[in-house]
Amino acid sequence: MDKQENDSLLNPENNGIDETADINIILQSEQNIDNDPDPDVVLFADNSESTQKESEAAKEDPLTAAAEPRYDYQERSYNKEKRPPKKKKEKQSNPLIKTSVITVILCMLFSAAAGFGGGFLANQLNQDNESDGKEVLYQSVVRTSTDVKSDKETLSVADIASITSNSVVAITTETVVTNNRMQQYVTQGAGSGVIITTTGYIVTNNHVIANASKITVTLADGSTHAAVLVGTDSKTDIAVIKIEGTELTAAVMGDSATLVVGELAVAIGNPLGQLGGTVTSGIISALDREITIDGETMNLLQTNAAINPGNSGGGLFNAQGELIGIVNAKSSGTGVEGLGFAIPINTVKPILEQLITYGYVKGRVTLGVKLIDINNLQTAALYNEKTFGVYVVEVDADSNAEKLGIQKGDYILTINGNTISESTDVKTALSALNVGDTATIAVLRDGTQIKLTGTLEETETN
């Protein structure tokens, strides 16, 4: 083994194999030294001893010594025919193992980069939301199957009540009403709501707080808070109110699109306006029930969980304690039981976002009037009118009604040819129109029919 080869083995930097391979080769070379029958190596190992024996033999028998050739290390090194140097055994690498190792390393690098990038992006989004004052709505992870047992734990009704009750509130309202004798008095109403942000935004029904002059919220701990109206949408019967607070318990929203008939449903609300925090359970009885309420056609969830007056605006939860609907109606009548309805949460979420952001739902067409149905003599006398019909009590400033020329005291007769017999017909007619459409409205004013035409604009009231 020459010096160059020896250096290459002892110095990993001088060859193209890794340090572990060098150690293996060195050990193998040392093992070969002990077992190699090469006479050069043996001679080198025993050189001094053999030379001494030959010298002693020469003294004893000069003739024998002269007849036999003399060998020493140096002579054998130069006169013996050189053998080709033994090739180093290179460690054969398995291409499959190399590919696997490279793949694993790349995956680790990609995962680390993705994790860092995702964390960085999430952090930036959170900072942006905080800096922009945006509210966070809590959304559950996506359910991958309609089978609730497949990838999510099914909770008991008691567990569901325990984790969701603090997010459901009782709502009481005060409304100023004028009686037939033009006397005003205050009426009280009651409903429910669900906390949707930790900072105090609450979703409820539009009909719960409509025309209310005062709104009070009672939390699960019994504390009461004055609430302000953020925005309403009569088309979906959704409203958002807000109380002052931090670190409130917000409901986690589920995905109503994954619901199946027969799935557990738990309703929590304030029935009769006096029994806040009441929990009732049942199942999802039907999906996408088309129901018309106050002239608005809605597609609702049907449940047989007990629903009573005061439950409106409360929460309907699934077996994982996720908010899947906002209770808004019950079918009442003799012999009618187990027919409750809720607005699917997937319908509610985009409305909430717009109400919180803008205070109204963009793109909706509204007239901006307060209407009343005069359909009896008593109501006619109250407004000093002799005609029955849909009567305009008030016109909002800068509304479509004002821009079209509608005035207080008018009767609305038709909208784009659709006969208006009651106030709900106005909602139905407007639902077929979009911002930018032309509307022709016929009104009765002082006994004369007038046609008013104009382009409908987006307004900040719904």
Image (cartoon, rainbow, N blue to C red):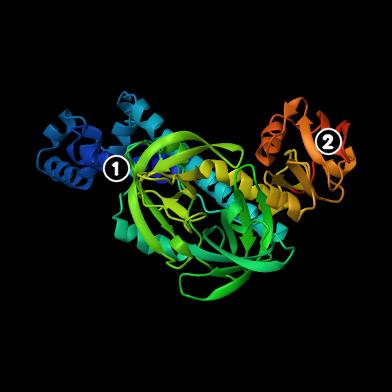
Q: Residues within 10 Å of mark 1 (few under 14, many from 20)?
A: few
442 over 398 or under it: above or below: above
Please tell me whether mark 2 sits on a helix, a strand or a loop: strand
Q: Give residue 27's position: percent from left, percent from top.
A: 27, 43
Residue 444 on image: x %, y %: 84, 37
Q: Quadrant of residue 92?
A: top left
Q: Quadrant of residue 9?
A: top left
Q: Mark 1 to mark 2: distance in Å? A: 59 Å
Tell me if residue 70 can be seen. Answer: no
Residue 415 is left or right of residue 34, and the answer is right
Give above or below for 125 relative to 16.
below
Q: Position of residue 446 (x, y in %)?
A: 89, 41
Q: Residue furthest left?
A: 60
In the image, what residue occupies the spot 56% across and 47% down?
118
Question: Residue sitting at 15 percent across and 35 percent down?
Answer: 65
Answer with mark 1 or mark 2, whichever residue precedes in sequence: 1
At x 64%, y 53%, the residue is: 124
The circle drawn on residue 443 is 2
The three-letter code of the residue at mark 2 reads Val
Instruction: Indicate the amino acid at tag 1.
Output: Lys
Q: Is residue 439 left or right of residue 148?
A: right
Query: In this orientation, which residue lies closer to the viewer: 456 or 165?
Result: 456
Q: Are marks 1 and 2 in contact (CB under 8 Å)?
A: no
Residue sitting at x 23%, y 40%: 33
Callout 1 secondary element: helix
Q: Which residue is mark 1?
A: 149
- Foreground disc of the pair 1, 2: 2
Examine the rendering and report whether any part of residue 166 can be seen: yes
The number of callouts visible is 2
Q: Residue furthest bottom?
A: 223
From the viewer's perspective, tell me whether residue 370 is left or right of residue 40.
Answer: right
Q: Quadrant of the N terminus?
A: top left
